[in-house]
Image (spheres, rainbow, N blue to C red):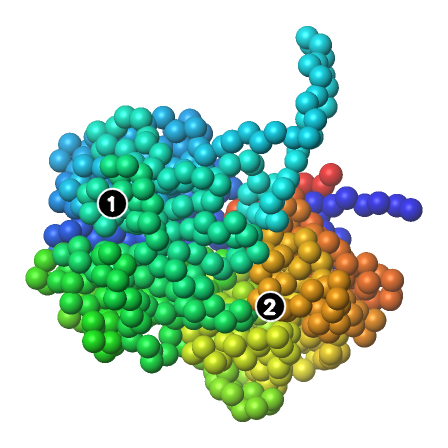
């Protein structure tokens, strides 16, 4: 048996012949080539000052040398648009204004060690609050501006079942055994969990020694200030908390004696408490747990002592996300997924709702997820700062007054790049699903040289989640596909968020299912429009899109090739070995794999792998614990055993977020296109196809 080990780009080379060396004087391509991934910049986390005059935000870019997505802090004068660097450290993030607007707190790293720093705006000087052995996060100012609350992991050493003998001096013994006793013992992005718990701390703004104010075996985090002497935190203190992965309550912590009292007690998640400007009321989010695969977050109000709890805007169509109080305390502002885009809504205390601004988003640079944020100033004419999303460029910083007037985009981060490239044109399409007529929204990138002559290849890209939402936003991955000539389509089939709870719950205990019909209806529509060739159809998707890709090829042979990325393949192994195993068992399948295996297998692509004839590429990160490597490997092995063309790509060092580094994003898109080129009837005349634009940063092993 011959075992071949290939790097990611070497895999693309196997799928296509090596290109001739480019002439040194060759003009650079005007398309969005692989290297252009490193050129884009985007804005995140805009924070407007209390007086509404200045916005601080994180300006993100791709570092070619470190292969990292890095961030620095920049300021914008709202009136003049003056745009300046503030903190140029590549790890600066999470800026938050002091209540009086004179200082900023932010997180960074110094010499590889995590820090929280306070920056004084009048002098431009900053200082670290303390020396941290673990990474602090969630920093929040007290109302009087004298104290910072934050969360930090607290390690602890748990005894094993045997004490090893002492090793002789200079001995090279094996590492000691690792003992795990919790149901959740590893997490995607973190790996196998260290012994310890995340807790809440406070620290004087002048610096000093952090004071731990919560304790115990259960995490208590996400702090907010009820007053200068009381913190609100969220967590699940139940002894069987591992068995109920969505449960949490809101607790009040008195700093004087560290006493903890619950403010909520219902069955279901309660979290995200925010205190009204007068300190008399608390708003928060959550829902009554009905043990379903998905439920929307509702909005609630209670008095500061926990009494008088009631739901606010009970008939609202959407799920409430990031929420803050309006400065006058007479309403709340909440970010809501709204039919493919993010919109900011005002919610009056009588439950009436009105839209303030829409088209927030653009902060998901890889794929076109609806990702964005906002902040609001104080004053009589409050200013809202937000990430503005676009189809043809990444997110920018924008502002608008709370009364809906004075809207303007304040940055142009890619004006040195995008106007000089040949970019695809985006169209929105809506179809009636062949299953039941539900309206399904989709978007399509048409390549720069597109003509509706029925000759172009189609690439259907399916989002993950599945309870997520794509939108009409710039995406480096989809730009790459369109730049290489694919009519690229993405959509929100049933199960997507942003279209009401019923639409999302349409896949409850039926996933994958009729979302297949939604997707095929979109493909039928593009063929009918003469946008694409029926013989040049390709499909891919990651995570939830990965299982749908695998599901599709078990049901149809209409696609020339497929690429299933970090998929779920077997719900039994997901329920027993993924980092969300109990959620899968309790909420998605609602059965036990040892007593009702059919409940798991009937929605598992592995059950039908013998039906697959479509050449199908499998790809997964080697450190993925959300949909672990063995998910992709099961399907790959089954395809091999059944004689179906397949290949397996493992991405070293990658967790579920495969594209967290720019070179990995390039490797993902270009290997997918290399696989598709191998089976494209136009490109494949019996000889290897010409490769896509070469990826950088890898070499053969």
Residue in view at x 55 percent, y 52 percent: 240
The answer to whether residue 314 is visible is: yes
- The mark closer to the camera, 2 or 1, is 1
Residue in view at x 61 percent, y 49 percent: 183
The disc placed on residue 588 is: 2
The reply, left or right, for residue 551 in relation to residue 46 is right
Residue furthest left as drawn = 380
Label 2 element class: helix
Q: Tag 1: Cα neighbours inside 10 Å, few (<14), some, or many (≥20)?
A: some
Residue furthest top as drawn = 169
- Which quarter shows the C terminus? top right
Residue annotated with mark 1: 230
Viewer-closest of 155 and 119 = 155
Residue in view at x 65 percent, y 30 percent: 160
The disc placed on residue 571 is: none
Estimate the x, y position of residue 77 in percent, counting from the top left: 17, 51
The reply, left or right, for residue 481 in relation to residue 12 is left
């Amino acid at each position: 048996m011959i075992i071949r080990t290939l790097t990611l780009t070497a895999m693309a080379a196997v799928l296509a012949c090596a290109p001739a060396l480019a002439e040194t004087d060759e003009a650079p391509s005007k398309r969005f080539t692989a290297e252009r991934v490193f050129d884009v910049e985007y804005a995140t986390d805009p924070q407007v000052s209390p007086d509404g005059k200045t916005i601080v935000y994180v300006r993100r870019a791709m570092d070619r040398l470190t292969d990292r997505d890095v961030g620095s802090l920049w300021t914008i004068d709202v009136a003049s648009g003056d745009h300046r660097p503030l903190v140029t450290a590549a790890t600066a993030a999470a800026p938050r204004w002091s209540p009086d607007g004179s200082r900023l707190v932010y997180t960074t790293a110094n010499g590889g060690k995590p820090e929280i720093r306070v920056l004084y705006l009048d002098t431009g000087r900053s200082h670290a609050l303390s020396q941290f052995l673990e990474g602090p996060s969630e920093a929040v100012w007290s109302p009087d501006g004298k104290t910072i609350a934050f969360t930090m992991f607290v390690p602890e050493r748990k005894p094993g079942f045997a004490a090893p003998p002492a090793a002789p001096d200079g001995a090279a013994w094996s590492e000691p055994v690792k003992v795990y006793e919790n149901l959740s013992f590893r997490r995607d992005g973190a790996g196998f969990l260290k012994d310890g718990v995340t807790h809440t701390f406070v620290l004087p703004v002048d610096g000093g020694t952090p004071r731990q104010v919560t304790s115990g075996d259960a995490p208590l985090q996400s702090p907010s200030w009820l007053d200068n002497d009381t913190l609100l935190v969220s967590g699940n203190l139940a002894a069987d908390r591992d068995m109920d992965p969505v449960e949490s309550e809101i607790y009040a912590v008195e700093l004087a004696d560290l006493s903890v009292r619950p403010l909520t007690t219902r069955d279901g998640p309660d979290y995200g408490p925010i205190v009204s400007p007068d300190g008399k009321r608390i708003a928060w989010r959550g829902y009554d747990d009905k043990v379903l695969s998905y439920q929307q977050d509702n909005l609630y109000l209670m008095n500061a002592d926990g009494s008088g709890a009631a739901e606010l805007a009970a008939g609202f169509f959407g799920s409430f996300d990031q929420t803050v109080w309006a400065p006058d305390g007479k309403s709340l502002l909440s970010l809501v997924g709204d039919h493919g885009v993010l919109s900011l809504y005002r919610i009056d205390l009588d439950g009436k709702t009105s839209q303030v601004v829409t088209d927030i988003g653009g902060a998901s640079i890889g794929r076109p997820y609806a990702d964005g944020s906002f902040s609001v100033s104080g004053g009589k004419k409050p200013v809202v700062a937000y990430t503005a999303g676009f189809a043809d460029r990444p997110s920018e910083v924008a502002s608008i007054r709370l009364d809906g007037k004075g809207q303007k985009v304040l940055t142009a981060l890619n004006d040195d790049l995008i106007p000089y490239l040949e970019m695809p044109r985006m169209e929105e399409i809506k179809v009636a699903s062949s299953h039941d007529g539900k309206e399904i929204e989709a978007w399509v990138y048409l390549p720069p040289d597109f003509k509706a002559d029925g000759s172009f290849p189609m690439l259907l890209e399916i989002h993950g989640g599945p309870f997520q939402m794509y939108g009409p936003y710039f995406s480096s991955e989809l730009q790459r596909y369109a730049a290489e000539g694919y009519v690229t389509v993405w959509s929100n089939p049933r199960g997507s968020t942003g279209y009401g709870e019923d639409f999302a719950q349409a896949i409850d205990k039926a996933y994958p299912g009729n979302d297949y019909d939604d997707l095929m209806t979109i493909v039928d529509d593009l063929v009918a429009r003469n946008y694409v060739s029926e013989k040049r159809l390709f499909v891919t998707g990651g995570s939830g899109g990965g299982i749908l890709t695998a599901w599709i090829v078990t049901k149809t042979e209409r696609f020339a090739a497929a690429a299933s990325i970090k998929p779920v393949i077997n719900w039994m192994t997901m329920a027993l070995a993924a980092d969300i195993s109990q959620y899968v068992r309790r909420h998605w399948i609602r059965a036990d794999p040892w007593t009702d295996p059919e409940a798991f297998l009937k929605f598992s692509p592995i059950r039908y792998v013998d039906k697959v004839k479509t050449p199908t590429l499998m790809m997964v990160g080697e450190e993925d614990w959300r949909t672990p490597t063995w998910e992709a490997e099961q399907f790959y092995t089954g395809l091999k055993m059944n004689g179906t063309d397949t290949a397996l790509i493992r991405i070293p060092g990658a967790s579920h977020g495969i594209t967290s580094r720019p070179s990995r994003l390039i490797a993902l898109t270009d290997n997918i296109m290399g696989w598709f080129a191998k089976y494209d009837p136009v490109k494949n005349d019996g000889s290897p196809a010409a490769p896509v634009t070469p990826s950088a940063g890898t070499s053969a092993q």
